[in-house]
Amino acid sequence: MRISLARARLELRHTFRIARSADEFRESVIVRLEENGIEGLGEAAPSPRYGQSAESAERALASIEGALLEPAGHIEDALERAAGRLAGEWAALAALDIALHDLLGKRLGVPLYALLGLDPGKTPPTSYTIGIDTPEIVAEKIREADGFPVLKVKMGLGNDREIMETVRAHTDRPVRIDANEGWTRDEALEKMRWLEGLNVEFVEQPLPAADLEGVRWLAERTSLPIFADESVRVASDVPRLAGTFHGINIKLMKCGGIREALRMIHTARACGMKVMLGCMIESSIGITAAAHLSPLADYADLDGNLLIRNDPAAGATTLNGKLVLPEGPGLGVTLREGPAANALERSSAR
Amino acid sequence: MRISLARARLELRHTFRIARSADEFRESVIVRLEENGIEGLGEAAPSPRYGQSAESAERALASIEGALLEPAGHIEDALERAAGRLAGEWAALAALDIALHDLLGKRLGVPLYALLGLDPGKTPPTSYTIGIDTPEIVAEKIREADGFPVLKVKMGLGNDREIMETVRAHTDRPVRIDANEGWTRDEALEKMRWLEGLNVEFVEQPLPAADLEGVRWLAERTSLPIFADESVRVASDVPRLAGTFHGINIKLMKCGGIREALRMIHTARACGMKVMLGCMIESSIGITAAAHLSPLADYADLDGNLLIRNDPAAGATTLNGKLVLPEGPGLGVTLREGPAANALERSSAR
């Protein structure tokens, strides 16, 4: 099998500010696996939160020889071998996982959702994310989010009230709050009690990842459901969160791909927890992979591709906020021609 | 979609005696789903332990109209709708699940293991089951089990020592013990301590299903791993067993099919538990369906088809005990011509 890598510089429409970072662009590594004339596409959108960068992901992927992934159809074992080499580079692992599933779907001539036995009509709407910003820019983002039935509002930098007041001055749509570990226990309690009256669906990661005890304390004192993001990475993290968090945010880039995401979905359901599918800033490759799983999710936050202006790929779209899956085989993703292709910089081929 | 049902009377090679029952034959309901000229095969092997019979399974399946399962490719939703109608008839649900997966594999022209991204070379060996019997018949069964690297020995009717002494007089192969809820706590403790020195891999269901506290008590006092069978039916049962049982026995007929079995495998792994794939007395239809999943399992006990003398189907086989998956599309199962076909009695078509 032939593996080739390319760097994509994804330029954000707006500076993307959350509790721990602010970015003008993010870099992905696009992976192509070629076997018998069929090409599988994958993407690694590395996360600084986990000590990853485009460089580290690329370096990790460059250490994988094609033979390690053969035969491509034995995805379970190929990924287990790859995982052993990619320690800590979960976004790189996700890229291989996505590309192997794309290959399998293309080889069989069916979309990924069909391989999984899912109804493409059962996708949920995706929320549209409003980063932390000035009232003027928050207002502009709300206009951009027109047609999306639910907003995800980032908090955790001290101007939470100002942001929420701006949101509510412009729309009464339901809102999901994401504090990205940005609150203390007391702050979280105060903010969540205030948010209870503001048509909020749930609050994501109010406290630092390790503070499970704090979430238990919060859950006893507030009525809004609490979702884990940074507190949960893979399926084996899920059982100990049950009874504390109400749901989990699953991201392909965090867990290592479609297979682990399925394991997490099944484990969360068995533990009586809700399931959200989330994302990093990603191109339409990573987003579409997650979108194919979304008929299994209660909630989707798959707007990473909508927040960039030079998406190098085309795949899942949205219609009035609802995710629409492409009908092509595998992911159903195509790389764009023209200016967007500039986002791809060929970096290596092996 | 056209659904047709047929009853199969599966005649046992030997009376099959376990702690709670003794049978000369068992009845399965064979399901055929036909869509666009492609036929999917499934089997319901109902369990009296759960109040099911061939009649009740057949009645439940006869209540399902073909339209309820359409389109056949949306397996997740089709089964959710069917489950709502088949309350308590999990073997009937498994039959539909198996047939829908067979259909999908046949439509795409690949074996089920390939749809699941699994390596058919990674199947485990299956154990061969020795029911509760006289020393003479136990000895005969051990001869039948020649070539199988591990035996499953049923206990729980008072002659445990006699059986184990007979087994050990004939073979030093590793043994798995299955008490089928047949022991009291004190008996279990005594038996398990005795078994510790007899090359036993693990003990299955030593106590009644509901006695989780008893298993905790046993696990603190014995060194043999303890597996749940009657104590676990579906994925949502798994988390509360973690930390008590060391592993679970997953049966398609108990949980409702391939999809729920996958959910159980993923949940058990996330909970740090071992996974065994087991079976009822089944034809090669049900056994082959489970065998396709077996590359994901630590242990297999998939010999239900080997214990009958008129298997109406051919599918997975064994080579020196190791499961060998058929290469045909879907399950890769064919119905036998000739005498074995007599096991099928056409009962209804709709």
Image (cartoon, coloured by chain):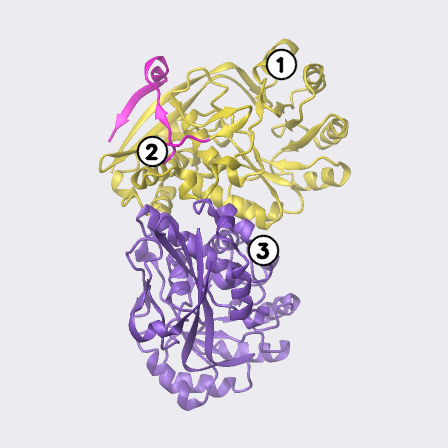
Chain colours: A purple, B yellow
Q: Which of marks 1 and 2 is nearer the N terminus?
A: 2
Q: Is residue B333 magenta?
A: yes
The spot of residue B216 in percent (x, y) is 70, 42
The spot of residue B128 in percent (x, y) is 57, 23
Spatial CA span between label 3 and label 2: 48 Å
The answer to whether residue B206 of the structure is visible from this angle is no
Spatial CA span between label 1 and label 2: 37 Å
Magenta region = B325-350
Image marks 1 and 3: residues in contact by CB distance under 8 Å: no
| Callout 1: chain | B
Against B335, residue A90 (above or below) is below
Q: Is residue B214 left or right of residue B121?
A: right
The spot of residue A117 in percent (x, y) is 36, 48
In the rendered structure, which amino acid carries the disc numbered 1?
Answer: Val
Spatial CA span between label 1 and label 3: 49 Å
Q: Is residue B34 magenta?
A: no
* Mark 3 surroundings within 10 Å by alpha-carbon count, few (fewer than 14), some (14 through 19), many (20 or more): some
The spot of residue B66 in percent (x, y) is 26, 38
Q: What element carries label 2?
A: helix
In the rendered structure, which amino acid carries the disc numbered 3?
Answer: Arg
- Identify the residue under disc 3: A85
In the rendered structure, which amino acid carries the disc numbered 2?
Answer: Leu
Residue B138: which numbered mark, if any?
1
Report which quarter residue A125 is drawn in.
Answer: bottom left
- Identify the residue under disc 2: B61
